[in-house]
Amino acid sequence: DTAPRKILYFVGVTDTNEFVFKPFCSSEPFYVHYYNFVNKAIKRVEIQGMGAFEKASGVRIFLNHVEDVKLMQ
């Protein structure tokens, strides 16, 4: 197996019973991984716009965070 391996860190569990994992180091593209332990499915979601954080490892992920976009006008 010549595919590069990534270290993933456990972030938490969503309301839909999915484990959430983030990579140790940010990269472009940046992915968050969801593992549904009920149906044993893995979903990989790309987060766009992470190029500015390419060399940073301090990317934090908060589950169930809601932003009020009305304040951004």
Image (tube, rainbow, N blue to C red):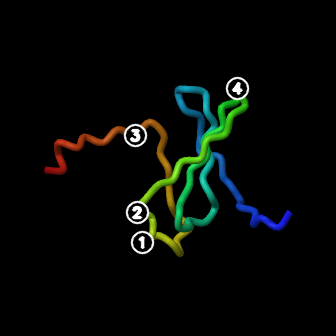
Query: Which residue position holds label 3?
Result: 65
Q: Quick one: label 3, few (<14), some, or many (20+) residues within 10 Å? A: few
Which of the two labelled residues, at mark 4 and mark 2, occupies the earlier sequence position?
A: 4
Q: What residue occupies the far right of the structure in this picture?
A: 1
Identified by mark 2, the residue type is: Gly
Q: How far across and how far down the image is residue 48, in percent?
A: 43, 58
Could you tell me if the residues under marks 4 and 2 are in contact, i.e. CB atoms within 8 Å? no
Residue 14 disc label:
none
Which of the two labelled residues, at mark 4 and mark 1, occupies the earlier sequence position?
A: 4
Q: Which residue is drawn at 53% across and 60% down?
A: 30
Query: Which residue position holds label 2?
Result: 49
Which of the two labelled residues, at mark 1 and mark 3, occupies the earlier sequence position?
A: 1
Residue 52 disc label:
1
Viewer-nearest of discs 2 and 1: 2
Label 2's element?
A: loop
Q: In this view, does 28 lie above or below 39?
A: below
Q: Quick one: label 2, few (<14), some, or many (20+) residues within 10 Å? A: few
Which quadrant would residue 52 be assigned to in this image? bottom left
Left or right: where does residue 5 sit relative to residue 15? right
Q: How far across and how far down the image is residue 59, in percent?
A: 50, 60
Could you tell me if the residues under marks 3 and 2 are in contact, i.e. CB atoms within 8 Å? no
Identified by mark 1, the residue type is: Ala
Q: How far apart are marks 1 and 3 (CA)?
A: 22 Å
Query: Which residue position holds label 4?
Result: 39
Viewer-nearest of discs 1 and 3: 1
Q: How far apart are marks 2 and 1 (CA)?
A: 7 Å
Q: What quarter of the picture does the N terminus occupy?
A: bottom right
Could you tell me if the residues under marks 3 and 4 are in contact, i.e. CB atoms within 8 Å? no
Q: Quick one: label 1, few (<14), some, or many (20+) residues within 10 Å? A: few
